[in-house]
Amino acid sequence: MSKRNSVLIIDDDAHLGETLKDILEEKGYHSRFTASGSEALGILSKESYETILLDIKMAPLNGLAIYRQIKQIRPQNVTIMMTGYAMQDTIKECLHEGARGILYKPISLDKIVIYIEALKCAMLILAIGMDGGGTKDLKEYLGAHNCWMSDVKDPDQAIRINQQIQHHFILLDPGLSMEDMLKTYASIIKLNPMTMGIFMVEGLGAKEDLLNKFFQEDPHVLICRPETPSAEILNRMHQMMKARG
């Protein structure tokens, strides 16, 4: 049985788990809570949930081990890991394995629905250093096509965000220097190897030539211009996602 707008919460903190369940029920979700990883696997063998909230630090199976088994049963589920500990190596491994994002405890209960809805989208895009007007137009278009785009001005902030959320794409503004573009892209790819890059360049110039030479038709990189129609950008993104598999 598949349930739309449904969430399975797996956490050995019963108080937090029940609280999250109650909040999500109030927001119109079908939610279920279990404090046992083995019980969760039993539930998922019979029922499908759109989203899974999974604590990392559990026993006897930890969250990463549970997640690996979930992927075998329900590979299509959106799984969001939760943690109250500084476990950077484990967090990085969870993201590399395919977890969509990380929720740090204490969890901001008033933002959890926004977070869940964002991570359920077909594509997550983080724009870095983008001009406000261009970002708004592209964000509105992508939002109407089941994509979630957020934007930050600072490349360092973008790297911090990608330590918590695995984006499908990062979009880099033409106002960034070549050094900042390449350094930011390299840092994020190191964190999340599945993330793809969209480099915005203005006009025909040295920056575009250098990027083309550097990436040499890399299928995971799109080089385009600010005036490129949003529909064309989205179409190319779909092609890249399909090629990535």
Image (cartoon, grey):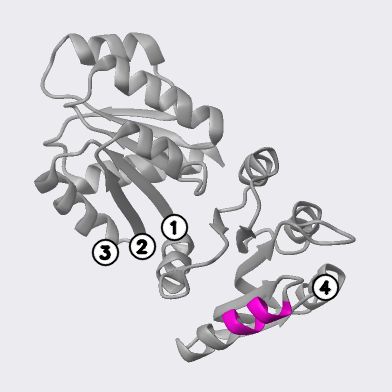
Residue 209, percent across and down?
24, 10
| Residue situated furthest right in the rendering | 60
- In this view of the protein, can residue 154 be seen by the observer? yes
Q: Earlier in the sequence, mark 4 or mark 2?
A: 4
Main secondary structure along the magenta-highlighted residues: helix
Q: Disc 4 or 1, which lies upstream in sequence? A: 4
Please name the amino acid that badge 3 sits on.
Ala
First in residue order: circle 3 vs circle 1: 1
CB contact under 8 Å: marks 4 and 1: no
The span picked out in magenta is 14-20
Q: Are the residues flagged by discs 2 and 1 in contact, CB closer than 8 Å?
A: yes
Report crowding for label 1: few under 14, some 14 to 19, many 20 or more residues within 10 A (C-alpha). few
The quarter of the rendered structure image containing the N terminus is: bottom right
Give the spatial CA distance, label 4 vs label 3.
38 Å
Side of 176 relative to 72 (left or right): left
Label 4 secondary element: loop
